[in-house]
Amino acid sequence: MKIVLLGSGNVATHLGTALKAAGHDIAQVYSKTEANARMLAKQLGCVFTTELTELVTDSDLYILSVSDDSVPRIARHFIGSNQILVHTSGTIELNTPGVSGVFYPIQTFSRQKTISFAKIPIAVEATSDPLAEVLLELGNSISSQVLQLNSNQRKAIHVAAVYACNFSNHLYTIAESILRDNGLDFDLLKPLIAETAGKINTYSPRSVQTGPAVRNDQVTIAKHLQFLENEPMLRDLYERLSQSIINFNQK
Amino acid sequence: MKIVLLGSGNVATHLGTALKAAGHDIAQVYSKTEANARMLAKQLGCVFTTELTELVTDSDLYILSVSDDSVPRIARHFIGSNQILVHTSGTIELNTPGVSGVFYPIQTFSRQKTISFAKIPIAVEATSDPLAEVLLELGNSISSQVLQLNSNQRKAIHVAAVYACNFSNHLYTIAESILRDNGLDFDLLKPLIAETAGKINTYSPRSVQTGPAVRNDQVTIAKHLQFLENEPMLRDLYERLSQSIINFNQK
C-alpha cells in the first residue's frame, strides 16, 4: 500500500519502520516540527512536509500517529476529502470528524528500544466494512495478532491497560520509594517483579494471587499499615487494594 | 554445612535443592505430613521425620520454611536448645522465641517451576554477629546477591513487594476481568505487560510512567471513569491510583 505517515513520535517511527519492512510504500512523512519530519523521512527513505496543505493526495491511506490532543485538529483537514485517515490512538473516538478508522497497536513504545511488531496485537476499527478489510490486511502484514473491535471494546482495552500497565508501573514506583526511604536498592525486587509479570503467560493472574490479602491475613496487613503510618496516601492504597483482592477472591 | 530442613513446601523444596547443589549436607527433612516429608527427603537424598522430638541434634543449622502461621509453634521447640534455627519468612519477627536468625530469599516460588537461586537476592538477619557471618556465607554459596538487614528493612522489602508484586498481580486480574466482560482475551495485553515490567530493568519506574494520569489528562480520565460507572470499587481504585500518580509526579 501507498501510505502517508502523519506524526514523527515513537508510534509513528516504529510503525513506519515495520510497514516499510513489510514492503509498503511510505510516500511521505508529515510533522509540524521540521527536524523530526526530516529525520523520520530520511530513515524511511521518503519525502517530508511540515504543511498539511502539501500532503500528497493520491495515497491509499493516511496514518495519524500524534498525541491525542492533536488528532482532532489534524483530522479536520481530511473532512470532505476522499483520502482515508486512520488514527493509532486507544482513546480517540472513531467518529472524530475527518477520521475513517483506527489502527491501534496495543503496546507502549520507547524511542530507544526497537521492538518486533510481529507479536504486537493490533486492534482495527472502521466506519465501513471495506475499510475494515483493508486495515485487517494491513495489520496482518506486520503482526500475527490482528482483530476488529467496536469502540466500546477498544475503550475496554485501554482502561484495562491503564490498570495492568500504567497503574502497575506506579506500584513499582511506590515500591522503589519505600525501599529508598529505608536505604535499600530497588534491584532487590527486580527478580520478584519479573517472576510475577512472567507468571501470567502461563496462569490466569487470579489463580496465582499471593500475599497477605488473598490469605485474609489481617495480622500481617495490620503490621504493614502500621509500617506505613506516616504515609496516609500509601496506607489508603494498601487498604483499598487489599480489600479489592479480598472481594475478588470471594466472587 | 550440615543442615536440617523443616518444611516441605515450595520454599523448602527450592532452597533445599539449591543448598544440596552447592555442596551442603542436608541431613534430614521434617514435615508433619509424612508423604511430603518422604518426597522431599527422597529428592534430597536424606532421611525424614514427622516428629520434632526426632530431629537430629548435631546439625549446624536448622532452616524453618513453613507457613508464617506455623513458625511460632515449631520455633518454640528450639527454646533453650543450642541448635540454631533460622526462618525464611519476610514477615515473622526476629525475636520470635526459639528463632536465632532469618534467611529470606526475596522471590516467589511455584512448585512446578525450577528457578535459579543464583539471581535471587537473599536477606539475612541474625541475633548475633557470628551467626550473621555464617548466614551471609551460606547465602553467598547459592546466590550472587546477599545482604544483611535489620528488621525494619526486611519489613520495608516485604511491604514494597506487596505493592510491586501482590498488588500488581491484582491489577492484572482486574484487567483480565474488564477484558473478559467485553468479550476480549487477556492475551491482548500480555506484550504490553511484559514491556512495562521489563522496562524497569533499564529505567527507574518513575521516569517511564505513562498514561492519562501522569499527563493529568482529565478528559481521558473522565471517559474511563464513565466506562466504569457500574463498577464502584474499580472506579474508586482508578481515581485513587490516578491521584497518587499525579501526587508523585508533583513531588
Image: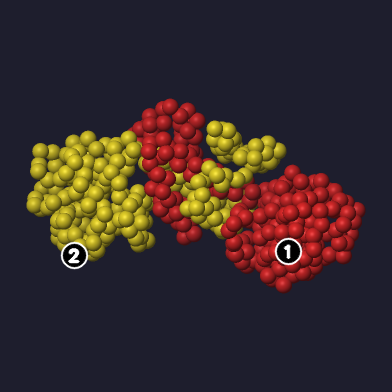
Chain colours: A yellow, B red
Q: Looking at the picture, how far across and down is residue B196, in whole percent?
A: 44, 52
- The percent coordinates of residue A133 (x first, y second) are 20, 47
- Residue visible at 13% across and 38% down? A79
> In this view of the protein, which residue sits in the foreground, A232 or B46?
B46
Q: Residue at x 53, y 43 (%)?
A: A206
Q: Is residue A151 left or right of residue B115?
A: left
Quarter where residue B105 is shown = bottom right
Residue B212 position, x and y percent, is 38, 41
Label 2's element?
loop
Q: Nearer the viewer, residue A172 or A31?
A: A172
Q: Residue at x 88, y 54 (%)?
A: B53
How packed mark 2 is, by other alpha carbons closer than 10 Å (few <14, some 14-19, many 20 or more), is some
Seen in the image, is B220 located left or right of residue B19? Answer: left
Task: Report helix, strand or loop for mark 1.
Answer: helix
Please, which chain is the residue tagged with disc 2 on? A
Mark 1 crowd level (few <14, some 14–19, many ≥20, 10 Å Cα): few
Which residue is most to the right?
B80
Per the image, the residue denoted by label 2 is: A45
Look at the numbered discs 2 and 1 and tell me whether their residues touch, using CB distance below 8 Å.
no
**In the rendered structure, the residue with mark 1 lies on which chain?**
B
The alpha-carbon separation of the residues under discs 2 and 1 comes to 65 Å
Q: Nearer the viewer, residue A69 or B89?
A: B89
**Mark 2 belongs to which amino acid?**
Gly
Q: Are marks 2 and 1 on the same chain?
A: no
Q: Quadrant of residue A113?
A: bottom left
Q: Amino acid at mark 1?
A: Lys
The residue that disc 1 covers is B42
Q: Residue furthest bottom?
A: B23
Q: Is residue B178 above or below residue B148?
A: above
Residue B210 in view of the camera: no
Q: Nearer the viewer, mark 2 or mark 1?
A: 1
Residue reaching furthest to the front = B35
